[in-house]
Image (cartoon, rainbow, N blue to C red):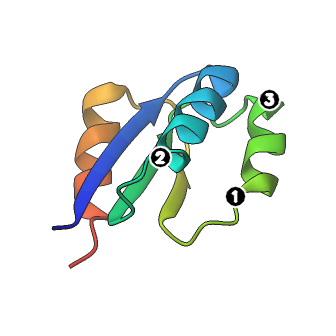
Amino acid sequence: MKFSIITPTYKRAAKLTRAVTSLLNQTYKDWELIIINDSPTDNSYEPFVTSINDPRIHYHVNDINKGVNFSRNYGLSKLSA
């Protein structure tokens, strides 16, 4: 059974990297991760974005800060079938 994880983030690039590393180290492999960055002007995410090489990880950036509820709902709209 596949499951999806929606992770809104706001100015916490280091914590996001730690969370993704933990997820990648799990033994269960049938998942997708949808990350919604709600801090579009924060450049500290650049190293993280360039290191994404897993097709199960989907990274999106809001055009402006819209809040956690918007980000979660946006993540729901990006779930795979």
Above or below, comparing residue 6 to residue 51 in the picture = above
On screen, residue 41 versus residue 23, left or right, reads right
On screen, residue 10 versus residue 45, left or right, reads left
- Quarter of the image for residue 52 reads bottom right
- Name the element at disc 3: helix
The quarter in which the C terminus is drawn is bottom left
The type of residue carrying mark 2 is: Ile
Q: CA distance from mark 3 to mark 2?
A: 15 Å
Contact between labelled residues 2 and 3, with CB atoms less than 8 Å apart: no
Q: Mark 1 or mark 3: which is in front?
A: 1
User: Farthest left residue?
Assistant: 1
Q: Which label is found at residue 35?
A: 2
The picture places residue 30, in percent across and down from the top left corner, at: 32, 66
The picture places residue 40, in percent across and down from the top left corner, at: 64, 37
Above or below, comparing residue 39 to residue 11 in the picture = below
Q: Which label is found at residue 44?
A: 3
Q: Residue at x 51, y 33 (%)?
A: 38
Q: Dot 2, how many residues are within 10 Å of its Cα: few (below 14), some (14-19), or many (20+)?
A: many
Q: Residue at x 55, y 40 (%)?
A: 20
The picture places residue 33, in percent across and down from the top left corner, at: 41, 53
Q: Mark 1 or mark 2: which is in front?
A: 1
The type of residue carrying mark 3 is: Ser
Q: Dot 3, how many residues are within 10 Å of its Cα: few (below 14), some (14-19), or many (20+)?
A: few
Sequence order check, earlier mark of 1 and 2: 2
Q: Residue at x 27, y 55 (%)?
A: 4
The picture places residue 55, in percent across and down from the top left corner, at: 55, 72
Sequence order check, earlier mark of 1 and 3: 3
User: Which residue corresponds to mark 1?
Assistant: 52
Q: CA distance from mark 1 to mark 3?
A: 14 Å
Q: Dot 1, how many residues are within 10 Å of its Cα: few (below 14), some (14-19), or many (20+)?
A: few
The quarter in which the N terminus is drawn is bottom left
The type of residue carrying mark 1 is: Ile
